[in-house]
Image: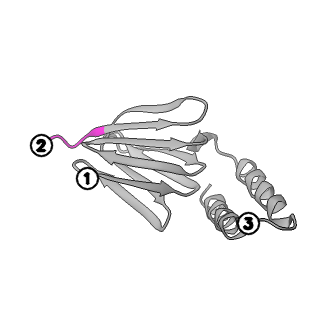
Amino acid sequence: MKNKFELTIISAERKVFDGEVENVLAPGMIGDFLVLSNHAPCISSIRPGFLEFSEGTSQKKRYFVSGGIIEVINNVVSVLVDYAIAGDKVVKEDITTLITEVDDKLSTGDIINRDDLQLRKNDLEEALKQA
């Protein structure tokens, strides 16, 4: 039984990762979820946070993702995000800047998506704690 599957992470700018992995831990909208080989087909939104995966070594790779979509089908996992930063390159200032941008939007008068922005801010603050 093959324990690996294909993972592709694509940002708006480039293909961030493409290769075989043993597992993926994704920041789902209602909680983190683990994808293993032969996972049931699904598609889900992901929130801003850290996406982790293992290629079979004891060391996990970690990326900060802006939020986006994950699709799992026939042992192929595709992650589409606005941007992704390798975990070892993420600095707290990057996430703090994103929080400030959301705060700026929240401080404007009449905005329709205030609740969505507040949830995004909460997710970013949680990611900041993990950075």
In the image, 81: left or right of 119? left
Find disc 1 in the rendering and name its residue. Answer: 39
Q: Quadrant of the N terminus?
A: top left
| Residue 25 included in the magenta stretch of the image | no
* Label 1: element kind: loop
Which residue lies most toward the bottom here? 115
Observer-nearest of 87 and 115: 115
Give the Cα separation between the discs numbered 3 and 2. Answer: 50 Å
Q: Considering only order in the chain, which callout, 1 or 2, is on the residue closer to the N terminus?
A: 2
Q: Residue at x 24, y 42 (%)?
A: 74
Name the mark nearer the viewer: 3 or 2: 3
Residue 31 place in picture, x, y as percent: 46, 67
Residue in front for this viewpoint, 72 or 34: 72
Q: Within 10 Å of the Cα at label 3, are there few (<14), some (14-19), or many (20+) other Cα atoms?
A: few
Mark 2–mark 1 Cα distance, whole angstroms, equals: 14 Å
Residue identifier under label 2: 1
* Sequence-wise first label, 1 or 3: 1
> SS of the residue at dot 3?
loop
In the figure, is residue 84 to the left or right of 19? right
Q: Quickly name the residue at label 3.
A: 112
129 is higher (above) or lower (below) than 68: below
Q: Position of residue 68 (x, y in %)?
A: 53, 49
Q: Residue furthest top?
A: 14
Q: Amino acid at mark 2?
A: Met
Q: Going 64% across and 45% down the picture, which residue do you hit?
A: 90
Q: Identify the element where label 2 is drawn.
A: loop
